[in-house]
Image (cartoon, coloured by chain):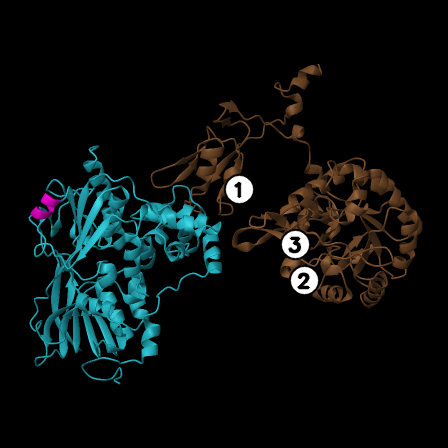
Amino acid sequence: MSSQMTPGIAAARLPSETVETHFADLHAPLAPHEASVAADRCYFCHDAPCMTACPTSIDIPLFIRQISTGTAEAAAKTIFDQNILGGMCARVCPTEELCEQACVREAAEGKPVEIGRLQRHATDKLMAKQSHPYDRAAATGKTVAVVGAGPAGLASAHRLAMLGHDVAMFDALPKSGGLNEYGIAAYKSTDDFAAREVDWLLGIGGITVENGKRLGADLSLDQLQADFDAVFLAVGLGGVNALHTPGEDKNGVEDAVDFIKALRQSSDLTKLPVGRDVVVIGGGMTAVDAAVQSKLLGAQNVTIAYRRGREGMSASSYEQDLAASKGVRLMFNVQPVALRGNGTVREVELEYTSDDGNGLKGTGEMIRLQADQVFKAIGQTLETDAGLELSGRKIAVTETGRTSVAGVWAGGDCASGGDDLTVTAVAEGRDAAMDIHATLMGSN
Amino acid sequence: MADLTTDFLGIKSPNPFWLASAPPTDKEYNVRRAFEAGWGGVVWKTLGAEGPPVVNVNGPRYGAIYGADRRLLGLNNIELITDRDLQTNLDEITRVKADYPDRAIIVSIMVPCEEDAWKAILPKVAATGADGIELNFGCPHGMAERGMGSAVGQVPEYIQMVTEWCKKYYDKPVIVKLTPNITDVRKPAQAAKNGGADAVSLINTINSITSVDLDAMAPQPTIDGKGTHGGYCGPAVKPIAMSMVSEIARDPGTHGLPISGIGGVTTWRDAAEFMALGCGNVQVCTAVMTYGFKIVEEMISGLSQWMDEKGYTSTADFVGMAVPNVTDWQYLNLNYVAKAKISQDDCIKCGRCYAACEDTSHQAIAMSEDRTFSVIDEECVACNLCVDVCPIENCITMEAITPGEIDPRTGKIVEKDYANWTTHPNNPSNFAAE
């Protein structure tokens, strides 16, 4: 067995029991007593700010009141009515920047009601009953293709199936779930929750799923339009931005999303190799997830190198604190200028940056970090535009997800206007489904 | 620190906090520990007549009502009087009183409504050296079915009769404990006074069913599938108790009759409120059954601090001070006009005031796009509901309009002179009297 000190990239740096503990639930589920204490703190606000702050507009005061009166199953229905992926959102939402930030008890005491954990309490309870809580409306005879089985695709497929349409869902990867399955940190989706949630969601019926079908390779938008009454694209961002830095091709330099994907699909994390000195380039959630998980796997030194200041990081302050608490070093105002090493990366050369108001510039001062593994986490890109009009680097859509082509809707990370959050993708998928429904049924 | 020594009917105790006749005072072990904890006195759990003691149920005796975080707000019980042998209790009372001469020990008694029964037990109680007796005319369950407890307390003639017997056969103070399960508490209080009672104590517990088991379809506490009404007590009953206390305190027939206040006293403030309404001391039960004897420390320190702040040197200084301000609705000043005011600095924007006012009251609170809540003076009748539902203390206050200014709701000048319903032009009897 290797140790944290083992040079290079090595597996089994920590004993399996330690790794198991490290990758357990980040937030343990609330025990029934904890849930009732937490629920009692809700003030049942009028036109509640938490509800306004939720991208899917879950009626939070109502579901918390339902928990406090002993009907967590009814609470779960309140949640799922607005957000069918309420289970995953309870785990991955940056609640500290959404509902819990808006909670009036945050204003009153600096301690919001634990909305995220209460949501998980309710949704877990209903999902544990293993029955799907929704019925389908009478068949409409309409068919819809949903491309991409991530949060947006799943939310739209479920809503469309519920409204009586037949849905064919396609996904490029072997498993459905999108970033829920392949992207987010393992300690936020334990016990194969992403896959279980997909199975549970599909319990509505009326949704066929074909995996291994990639838009542009195995599917064409033209054919989908010909075969279905409507198309919803939720293909996410399959491409990864390059660093454009000398040495980017050296061994040990990887995309953070690939590392996270491999980690999420690993059945034995002690077999997953990680560097002794890991440097993650980037400042978003992917950077934090890669860095924290490297540390949890046993990397001795993990550094996040971000080119702007702390305030510029798209990872929330909560995530920054999480990384710091796990022992990740956060470096700000540094940009990579070279990745050095003889075939295999050995160190990262960074240049300090400053922003004088006219854009970010290198100061000329350098610093070198030892690195035997470098993760690039500087953003993902749209893989195929399928001939649709773009807005910036994403598919241009209206508020209800309509693209430039009639009969084609898009939502989630591939579409313009979002914020790359699971919960926003769910809202977009749901809202596009409602618009598709209205269009297909001729009321729009 | 203010001296809390209290003289009630000539019985001195180091503070006005007594334990009520109830499970906490059922035996020597408890009472000794209560005195060690600092309680000023106890009313020993009700003794019955000599002979085989009563038996209690062998299942749940208590039911509860909770507030947020399972804070116990109301407790109900179906326990009877002491189920221990009379002589055992008498021996224990004798020993404890001998060891704690500075503390008050009152013996609660409930025997059948026959002169001989009272004549038999009173000398035995007197022999213990206890400071007085309390007649349990209040217990609403179990014993009432046997013609005792509230069955006596609901008939003023019986109260007077039994009180007279007690005054005849016992020479120390007699306190009559009243039941709230009547329509007008002044009648039994008057009867007690007529019978020669030295004081009344109130309230005893209120007939109640706290909850229903929706699986068993039976009231709780449930004994083998059945339940019965029990006696309700705890913080939830305090308003009822204080109203009854005030009725006795201000009724010309009973004004000045010493009162021992009972009913949901949980903190020093509750005690001070009862005393302001005319109680010479208070009796506590549910609060110690919830938190233990230790709470008396907070009650002692709190009352002392408040008395110091107010300049009171004796508990007698403020007893009854609020009584003159308890009046009938018809004498309230209808020319007094107030408006709610919301402190924007304290507001946490929960909107409960808005929901309450908009949905159920006078539509007198406005809500802006950015959730600023403000009072519409043109609509506000100062009902206080917004204050009551606001989670932040003192965030919403009621501000009186200075006489001479215009009430934006009525468009009329606020009069400075007092005027009540008796002389109001809308009062039909005002004209009828002419």
Earlier-in-chain disc, 2 versus 1: 2
Q: Amino acid at mark 1?
A: Asp
Q: Amino acid at mark 3?
A: Asp
| Mark 1, secondary structure of its residue | helix
Amino acid at the residue labelled 2: Phe
Query: Which secondary structure is most common in the magenta stretch?
Result: helix
Q: Residue at x 71, y 16 (%)?
A: B433
Q: Badge 1 is on which residue?
A: B388
Picture disc at residue B224:
3
Q: Earlier in the sequence, mark 3 or mark 2?
A: 3
Residue A209: percent from left, percent from top: 20, 54
Q: Chain of mark 2?
A: B
Tell me if mark 1 has few (under 14), some (14-19) or many (20+) residues whose alpha carbon lies within 10 angstroms of its own. some
Q: Identify by letter the chain in brown.
A: B
Image label count: 3
Q: Position of residue B339 (x, y in %)?
A: 51, 34
Q: Is residue A226 magenta?
A: yes
The front one of A202 and B235 is A202
